[in-house]
Amino acid sequence: MNRAALADFLRRRREALRPSDVGLVPGPRRRAPGLRREEVAALTGMSVDYYARLEQQRGPQPSEQMLAALARALRLTVEERDYLFRLAGHGVPRRLPLESHVAPALLRVLDRLEDSPALILSGLGEVLVQNRLAEAIFGAPPATGLARSSVYRWFMEPESRNVYPPEDHERQGRSQVASLRAAHAAAGPGSAADEVLRVLLRESPEFVRMWELHEVSRRFEDHKTLVHPELGRIDVDCQALFTEDQSQALLVLTPAPGTEAEEKVRLLAVLGHETFA
């Protein structure tokens, strides 16, 4: 662990960011450029004291999970993330086509989306990050295991389908399978996509039926009907922004102006996860 280089790198990356770069309001009385230490700590879920000790060359070796959180908070590129891991004395995370390090360009766009549900997905349908409105609709994603993949949940945890109306289940299922085929082709044998595929082929006859159609796609439907447990149906248009290698996608869900769906999304923005009267 190179404490001096790690401290300098963290400080310089922190000072290079503006609050607006990470979705924060600048606020008054900012005497120095960049983010404050407490802001980086809040973005990563660590204590201010812990982060301050890292910048002061006094902290313990950060875990790989903590480094991944720092890389995301500081909007590091993949190369910068790898450098951060090396400075902290860890091996560089293995790079796969289904890269779980969120693309900084997509994060910058997500940070600016406050009035529309938006989330960033991996090629395997894992929610890498989502805003408050998206979580109010879809809920918090599983943190670990195969269930992080939306296609795994679709066929192994049928209650996950409740966010879509029953008449859309066949189409959504085929779309999930087609996305998995594209992800599996990119990642290959031994990957997480391969593990999901093997489990579903063994456990789900419904999946097998759709897999045999040999459909492949990473395209998202232009229009979706979502079902909220208390607000009911919400019709939204879906726009997807992909990284250059197609490994990640930012989905933005917007209701048509002046519609009942727009009013429901506004209500979600105010109440979030609170119980509706």
Image: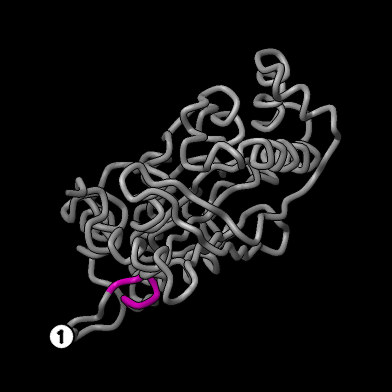
Residue 11 shows in the view: yes
Q: Position of residue 89 (x, y in %)?
A: 45, 43
* Picture mark count: 1
Q: Position of residue 151 (x, y in %)?
A: 61, 34
Q: Which residues are magenta?
A: 19-24
- Extreme residue in the top direction: 202
Residue 188 lies left or right of residue 123; in this view the side is right
Name the foreground residue: 106 vs 69.
Answer: 106
252 above or below 192? below
Q: Position of residue 2 (x, y in %)?
A: 41, 51
Q: Position of residue 211 (x, y in %)?
A: 79, 29
Residue 241 lies left or right of residue 260; in this view the side is right
Residue sitting at 38 percent across and 48 percent down? 232
59 above or below 55? above
Residue matched to label 1: 28
Residue sitting at 33 percent across and 51 percent down? 231
Task: Label 1: state its secondary structure.
Answer: loop
